[in-house]
Amino acid sequence: MSDAYTATDLAILERQIDEWLGMLRAGNDHIVAIDRAVDDVIRWYVRMRGDDKEFTTVWLTLGQRTLRYETYVMPAPEEQHAVLYEHVLRRNDTLVGAHFSIGAEDALYLRGELPASAVTFDELDRVLGTLYAQVEQCFLALLRIGYASRFSS
């Protein structure tokens, strides 16, 4: 198990993530909002404008050992559950640093985590880019599987 970061280490990493987010906002017109959670958890969200999915919001949560990230992909499918879950499990096989999972109310999420020691600007760019690209690449296909009867007219 990796060593837990001290409060000082976490504060340094927190400032680095804030700095990266500031640069991201300045240099990317797909970014709609960046904000911080106001509670005991060190957490940010990045809301991006998409093409196939109107918005994708990625949550970044800094813990003592890891940076967790996740985005909500879609609500629970209404039909063809097995087909949809097979589809995302096959996609999981090619993903690096992220995976599809079932969350609250059976909604579909894309999640992952990094050791705190691996958090760099390049790695943060890769994480955000991976989540955004995956949602954009699969969103309509997932909707067509999970809500097929709504698309059959």
Image (cartoon, rainbow, N blue to C red):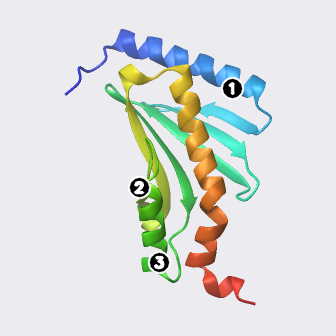
Q: Tell me: residue 38, above or below residue 26.
A: below
Q: Which of 51/109 is in front?
A: 51
Locate the N terminus and report the quarter of the image it occupies.
Answer: top left
* Image coords of residue 16 (percent x, y): 53, 15
Between disc 3 and disc 2, the foreground one is 2
Image position of 153 (left or right of 95): right
Q: Is residue 118 above or below residue 54?
A: above
- Residue in view at x 70 percent, y 43 percent: 48
Task: Specify the farthest residue to the front.
Answer: 94
Left or right for 33, reference 87: right
Q: Which mark is residue 93?
A: 2
Q: Identify the residue shown where x is 61% and y is 20%.
A: 20
> How much space separates mark 3 and mark 2, taking CA atoms?
16 Å
State left or right for residue 47 relative to residue 105.
right
Residue 102, picture quadrant: bottom left
Residue type marked 2: Asp
Task: Report crowding for label 1: few under 14, some 14 to 19, many 20 or more residues within 10 A (C-alpha).
Answer: some
Q: Residue at x 76, y 39 (%)?
A: 30
Which residue lies under the disc numbered 3?
Answer: 83
In the rendered structure, are the residues bearing label 1 and label 2 in contact, judged by CB atoms less than 8 Å apart? no
The answer to which of marks 3 and 2 sits earlier in the sequence is 3
Give whichever of discs 3 and 1 has the lower sequence position. Answer: 1
Question: How far across and how far down the image is residue 107, in percent?
Answer: 48, 65
Pointer 3 local density, CA inside 10 Å: few below 14, some 14–19, many at least 20: few
**Residue located farthest toward the left when viewing the structure as drawn:** 1
Residue where numbered disc 1 is placed = 24
Amino acid at the residue labelled 3: Val
- Name the one closer to the observer, 12 or 135: 135
